[in-house]
C-alpha cells in the first residue's frame, strides 16, 4: 500500500477558484459598487439642493441688506422741497460733467438707467454724508467771479470745526429758483475766514440763494440687475447714464451674484390733506415737489437664484414642481423668470429661487412732516 505524504495531500486539496466562483464574486462586487454609487448620487443630490438653497439665501440676504442700508439714508441732505424734482449737474474736478434729471431721494426706473435685465426695476438713491441743515444755508454775498460764497455760519478753517471743509460737495440753488430748476453740485476748493467758501466754477446770482452741503462722500447710487447679478454705480464717480458703460464692471460693480430680479413700489400718502400715512403702493413717479413729499416708504422685492443647476426641472407650474416666485406687489402674475439672464442652453426651471421682501420707511422724508399746501 502506497503512502501519501502530508504535503502531497494538501496540494491535492488546494484546487483554487473555479470560473463560476470568480464570476459570482465579481457580480457581488459590482452590485456593491452600484449600491455605493447610488447612495453617493442621492447624497450628492441632497448636498447640491442644500448648497444651492444656502447660496440663494446668502446672496439674497446680503443684497437686501445693502439696499436697505442705502434706502434708509435716502433723502438725507436733499429733502428740501425747493430741490426735489430739480435737474442736478455734477461738476467733476477733472472738468468732465454730467446731468441727472429729476433729483429725488429715491426714484424707481429713472430714465437715465438703461440696459437692465428684462422684468426687473432699477433704483436711484440719493443722500448726503454731511450733518448740515437739511434746508440749506443762506448765501449773504458772492464774489465777482461767482466762485466764492459768503455764508451765514462761521467756517473756522483754522480749527476745522466749521460747517464746510475742502472736498465737500455743495449744491447751489439760486433765488428765485429758475423755472428749469437746474442746480449744480461741485467740490469746495478753499475755505477762508470768517465765512467764505470757494468752489471750482460757481453759480451766478447766488446772493440770497441757498447752499446745501452734501459732505465729502455723498451718494447718488444707481442699482440695476445686469446679467443675473445686482450691480451698483455711483453718479458721484461715474456717469451711470452712459449706455456704453453698462457692461463695464469698473462702472457698474457687481454686489450680489445670482440676484436675478428686483421689483419696487412707492408707498405714498394719497390723503387730502396729508396725514403722514401710506395709503397706496404703486410705481407712479411723482412729478412735483409735493408729490415727492408724499412718498414715505418703498416696498422692495429681490429674487435670488441658486448657483447650481438641477438635473431636472424643479421650478414651474407643473404638478410636483416649486411654484415660480411671487411678491406682495404683484398684480396676480408671478415673477417671469424666463426673462432672467441665463447662459445659453440653460433653462430657468432648473434652478431654485428665493424671494426676499421688505418695506423700508423713507425716514428722512417722514421727518419733514405734513407739508402745508400738499
Image (cartoon, rainbow, N blue to C red):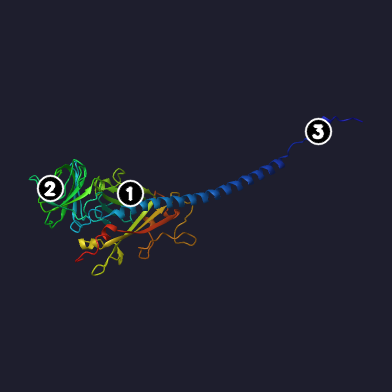
Q: Is residue 7 shown to the viewer in this render?
A: yes
Q: Which residue is mark 3?
A: 10
How many residues crowd around disc 1 within 10 Å: few (fewer than 14), some, or many (20 or more)? many
Query: Residue sitting at 49 percent across and 49 percent down?
Result: 48
How far apart are the alpha carbons under marks 1 and 3?
80 Å
- Secondary structure beneath dot 1 equals strand
Query: Residue sitting at 67 percent across and 45 percent down?
Result: 28
55 or 228: nearer the viewer: 55
- Mark 1 or 3: in front is 1
How many residues crowd around disc 2 within 10 Å: few (fewer than 14), some, or many (20 or more)? many
Left or right for 372, reference 118? left
Q: Indicate the position of residue 238 as horizontal and vertical percent values.
A: 25, 45
Q: Indicate the position of residue 337 as horizontal and vertical percent values.
A: 39, 56
Q: Which residue is mark 2?
A: 150
Q: Indicate the position of residue 199 as horizontal and vertical percent values.
A: 15, 44
**Residue furthest to the bottom:** 272
35 or 209: nearer the viewer: 209
Q: Is residue 115 shown to the viewer in this render?
A: no
Q: Earlier in the sequence, mark 2 or mark 1?
A: 2
- Mark 2 or 1: in front is 2
Q: Indicate the position of residue 37 as horizontal and vertical percent values.
A: 58, 46
Q: Which residue is mark 1?
A: 231
How many residues crowd around disc 3 within 10 Å: few (fewer than 14), some, or many (20 or more)? few
Across the whole image, how many numbered discs are drawn on residues? 3
Instruction: Specify the quadrant that holds the N terminus.
Output: top right
271 or 153: nearer the viewer: 153
- Secondary structure beneath dot 3 equals helix
How far apart are the alpha carbons under marks 2 and 1?
40 Å
Left or right for 35, reference 220? right
- Mark 2 or 3: in front is 2
Q: Earlier in the sequence, mark 2 or mark 3?
A: 3
Amino acid at each position: 500500500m502506497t503512502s501519501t505524504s502530508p504535503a502531497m495531500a494538501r496540494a491535492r486539496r488546494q484546487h483554487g477558484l473555479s470560473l463560476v466562483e470568480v464570476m459570482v464574486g465579481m457580480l457581488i462586487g459590482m452590485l456593491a459598487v452600484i449600491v455605493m454609487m447610488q447612495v453617493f448620487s442621492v447624497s450628492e443630490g441632497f448636498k447640491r439642493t442644500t448648497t444651492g438653497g444656502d447660496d440663494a439665501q446668502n446672496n439674497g440676504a446680503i443684497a437686501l441688506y445693502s439696499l436697505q442700508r442705502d434706502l434708509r439714508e435716502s433723502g438725507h441732505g436733499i429733502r428740501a422741497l425747493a430741490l426735489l424734482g430739480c435737474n442736478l449737474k455734477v461738476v467733476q474736478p477733472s472738468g468732465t460733467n454730467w446731468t441727472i434729471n429729476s433729483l429725488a431721494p429715491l426714484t424707481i426706473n429713472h430714465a437715465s438707467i438703461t440696459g437692465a435685465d428684462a422684468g426687473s426695476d432699477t433704483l436711484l438713491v440719493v443722500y448726503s454724508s454731511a450733518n448740515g441743515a437739511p434746508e440749506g444755508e443762506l448765501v449773504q454775498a458772492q464774489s465777482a467771479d461767482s466762485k466764492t460764497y459768503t455764508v451765514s455760519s462761521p467756517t473756522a478753517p483754522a480749527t476745522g470745526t466749521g460747517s464746510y471743509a475742502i472736498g465737500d460737495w455743495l449744491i447751489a440753488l439760486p433765488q428765485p429758483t429758475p423755472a428749469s430748476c437746474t442746480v449744480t453740485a461741485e467740490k469746495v476748493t478753499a475755505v477762508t475766514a470768517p465765512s467764505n467758501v470757494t468752489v471750482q466754477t460757481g453759480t451766478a446770482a447766488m446772493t440770497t440763494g441757498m447752499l446745501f452741503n452734501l459732505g465729502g462722500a455723498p451718494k447718488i447710487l444707481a442699482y440695476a440687475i445686469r446679467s443675473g447679478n445686482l450691480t451698483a454705480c455711483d453718479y458721484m464717480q461715474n456717469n451711470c447714464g452712459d449706455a456704453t458703460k453698462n457692461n463695464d464692471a469698473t462702472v457698474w460693480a457687481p454686489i450680489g451674484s445670482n440676484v436675478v430680479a428686483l421689483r419696487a413700489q412707492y408707498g405714498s400718502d394719497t390723503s387730502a390733506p396729508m396725514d403722514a400715512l401710506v395709503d397706496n403702493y404703486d410705481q407712479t413717479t411723482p412729478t412735483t415737489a409735493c408729490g415727492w413729499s408724499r412718498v414715505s416708504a418703498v416696498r422692495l422685492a429681490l429674487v435670488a437664484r441658486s448657483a447650481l443647476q438641477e438635473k431636472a426641472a424643479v421650478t414651474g407650474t407643473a404638478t410636483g414642481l416649486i411654484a415660480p416666485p411671487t411678491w406682495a406687489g404683484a398684480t396676480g402674475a408671478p415673477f417671469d423668470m424666463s426673462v432672467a439672464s441665463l447662459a445659453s442652453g440653460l433653462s430657468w426651471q432648473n434652478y431654485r429661487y428665493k424671494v426676499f421682501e421688505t418695506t423700508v420707511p423713507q425716514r428722512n422724508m417722514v421727518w419733514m412732516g405734513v407739508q402745508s399746501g400738499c
